[in-house]
Image (tube, helix red, strand yellow):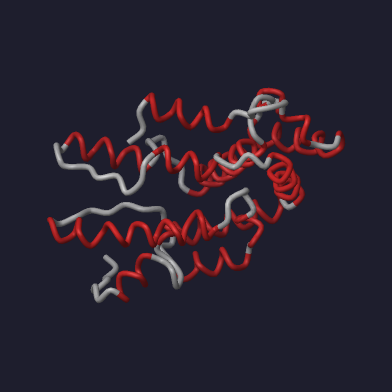
């Protein structure tokens, strides 16, 4: 559940503890990042001066995804996770968070190795064409409800995982954590469990992990 306190906490984690963004780049690297950032977001990179390099990478990732998603499936609605949380409240049903905003903000922005983040941002910018191509392929697979194709796309475009946090940390470990919570929740009552699509696929995906625990998993 996103509230003002949670949003403020995330913003705080994104701020550099020393220096400003340009301090962590060679001049030519910063200029390249500046050009790509303006092209993707429409904003000057100077606005991100107080922020960690990982925050810039995440902004670029969001901008690319939003642009392609708008083209493939135009929508004026709210983000799906926000809509689900609000709809649950509207229906006066219990809402259980599988992890906290603090955990998520630490996962994405808790790292203080700014030089490494800067190197990853430079790599991200240098591979922008492949990242855009991979993002389009991934969203097309998602819209086609094709989990196998989603998994294959991630394997075919490793550049998309270069966002400062490993896929193991972003996906696999969180799946294992959730599998420690879900059986008890499902035992208590029927559940509607909403997760990002990448958490469903692969050997360490929730579908396979639930099947290993003896659950019958059926697509609808």
Q: Residue at x 51, y 56 (%)?
A: 169
* Image-quadrant location for residue 217: bottom left
Q: Is residue 146 above or below residue 197?
A: below
Residue occupying image coordinates x 30% and y 70%: 210
Where, quadrant-wise, is the N terminus in this rendering?
A: top left
User: What residue appears at the point 51 percent right and 42 percent down from the top-left corner?
Assistant: 70
Q: What x and y, as percent, mark residue 30?
A: 80, 35
Left or right: 203, with 81 as reference point: right
Give x and y (percent) for residue 153: 56, 65
> Does 66 sit left or right of 46 as displayed?
left
Q: Quadrant of the C terminus?
A: bottom left
| Quarter of the image where one finds residue 97 | top left
Seen in the picture, residue 202 relative to 136 is either above or below; the reply is below
Give the number of marks: 0
Horizontal and vertical percent position of residue 83: 31, 38
Q: Seen in the image, is 56 located left or right of residue 220? A: right
Residue located at (35% from left, 28% from top) = 3
Q: In this orientation, which residue lies closer to the viewer: 192 or 51?
A: 51
Q: Position of residue 155 (x, y in %)?
A: 59, 68
Q: Is residue 162 above or below residue 202?
A: above
């Amino acid at each position: 559940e996103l509230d003002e306190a949670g949003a403020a906490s995330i913003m705080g984690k994104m701020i550099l503890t020393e220096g400003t963004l340009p301090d962590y780049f060679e001049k030519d690297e910063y200029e390249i990042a500046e050009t790509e950032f303006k092209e993707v977001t429409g904003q000057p990179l100077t606005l991100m001066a107080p922020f960690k390099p990982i925050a810039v990478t995440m902004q670029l990732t969001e901008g690319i995804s939003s642009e392609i998603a708008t083209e493939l499936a135009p929508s004026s609605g709210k983000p799906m996770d926000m809509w689900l949380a609000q709809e649950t409240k509207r229906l006066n049903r219990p809402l259980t968070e599988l992890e906290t905003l603090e955990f998520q903000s630490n996962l994405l922005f808790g790292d203080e190795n700014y030089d490494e983040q800067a190197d990853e941002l430079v790599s991200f910018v240098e591979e922008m064409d492949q990242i855009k191509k991979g993002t389009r392929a991934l969203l097309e697979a998602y819209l086609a409800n094709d989990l196998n194709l989603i998994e294959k796309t991630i394997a075919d475009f490793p550049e998309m995982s270069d966002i400062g946090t490993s896929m193991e940390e972003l996906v696999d470990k969180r799946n294992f954590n959730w599998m420690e919570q879900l059986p008890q929740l499902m035992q208590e009552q029927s559940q509607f469990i909403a997760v990002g699509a990448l958490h469903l696929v692969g050997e360490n995906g929730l579908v396979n992990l639930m099947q290993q625990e003896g659950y019958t998993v059926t697509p609808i």
